[in-house]
Image (spheres, rainbow, N blue to C red):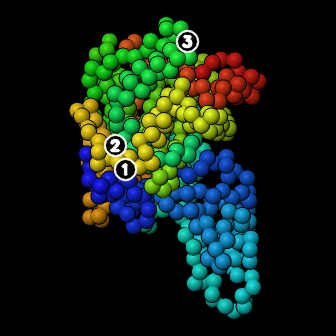
Amino acid sequence: MLTQEQNQTLTQVGAGTPMGDLLRRYWHPIAASSEVEKIGTTKKVKLLGEELVLFRDKSNNLGLVGDRCAHRGVSLEYGFPTECGIRCQYHGWLYDRLGQCTDQPNEPETSNFKNKIKIAGYEVKELGGLVFAYMGPAPAPELPKWDLFVKDNVIRTIGFAVIPCNWMQIMENSLDPTHLEWLHGHYFEHVFEQQGRPQEEWKITKHHLKIGFDEFDWGIIKRRVLEGQTEENEDWAIGHPIVFPTMLRVGDSGAHSFQIRVPMDDENTLHFWYTCFVPKDGVQVPDNYPISFYECPITDENGKYVVDYIDGQDMMAWITQGTIADRTTERLGTSDKGIIMYRRMLQRELKKMENGEDPKCVIRDPELNNHIELPQEENKFSEGGLLSGVAKEWNTRYAPNLDEIIDICKGGKVTSNL
């Protein structure tokens, strides 16, 4: 268990807090590019406790500034982008893409008042269909080109949800292999049984024989051996990575995914499911093929958690731990060694930052950042795998129908399946 002080240190993300300062050393996705594709668009966002407005100006550049105009506190969500920034709708004060006031129409032309006015403003960049923001000290590090963001010849989809709980309990779930056996195994069987599905469709659970964790350059590799498997199985021999500090990589030979946890504030997390589907039969995907963007449901029309798909089960577990999990009352066992390893890594990287060093996964070398290939098992659902058949199919229930969006060849509709 942790003390209350330790729990606060790891969960608070506001400016001036230890974890808030650490997380500001990294780029975080804040929107899909398609949300701000149109010139003149504004979108209100929240990141690390700060209310911000993302916009695309008339020069087709993105900007990210504080939500409130410095003049009278009006929200810039309703401001209007110009050639070189965003102008407040109330009295016309103009801010550039980093928050510096550059024009005050009703002040004397000779006044230097505008030079003294600046609101929050942060760097933004686009990569792989997402908009990323950097809120830390200058100079900004490289925006990491993780392999899925720059991978060729794939169909991309982006799912999202705003999850009403702290980011840490979501990340700790990724360091907890045995919940797969129970939450996505035995519990899945219970849900299907309650739905009256035939038993042969939902007998899917395999027991964990062994779990393991290893630190590597970009985070932690998670491994498991299930009943019917040996250490030669890819889920142990290769495993899949947790990329420090806020990303999980999962998948198989047909599709690879990032799960990205973006702390909005202490009590809310913007979650992205970023998936690359690999087409079969030599199908070529155009570079400009559109990226679908969809919302993952948390609750149904009656306010009940949607628990008949894997991501819904995860969200139910994260949220029902409480807005901020109380780690002073937990009782960790030997199966929780991955969680303990991750917490110690966070504490170690906090100390490095306090000593003036770059923490783990802060990249300064452009050559190193050209294309960062991550290890990933390719045969996760092979013989002895935990989830196959109906469970695997159910996990894509709320994603777009890829058979309907594979019209990707200039000659017409492609009929091959993904």
- N-terminal of the two: label 1 or label 2? 2
Residue 74 quadrant: bottom right
Relative horizontal placement of residue 151, taking residue 93 as reference (left or right): left
Q: Which mark is residue 197?
A: 3
Whether residue 135 is situated above or below residue 216 in the rendered picture: below
Confirm whether residue 406 shows in the render: no
- N-terminal of the two: label 1 or label 3? 3
Dot 3 amino acid type? Arg
Q: CA distance from mark 2 to mark 3?
A: 40 Å
- Report which residue position mark 2 lands on: 219
- Secondary element under disc 2, as helix, strand or loop, is strand
Graded by Cα atoms within 10 Å as few (under 14), some (14 to 19) or many (20 or more), the crowding at tag 2 reads many
Quadrant assignment for the N terminus: top left
Residue drawn at x 24%, y 34% as measured from the top left: 333
Frontmost residue, 358 versus 49: 49
- Asked whether the residues under the numbered discs 1 and 2 touch, taking CB atoms below 8 Å apart as contact, a structural biologist would say yes
Point out residue 356 in the picture as x, y percentages from the top left corner: 30, 65
Instruction: Kindly report which numbered mark, 1 or 3, lies closer to the viewer in this rendering.
Output: 3
Residue 63 quadrant: bottom right
Relative horizontal placement of residue 394, taking residue 165 as reference (left or right): right
- Asked whether the residues under the numbered discs 2 and 3 touch, taking CB atoms below 8 Å apart as contact, a structural biologist would say no
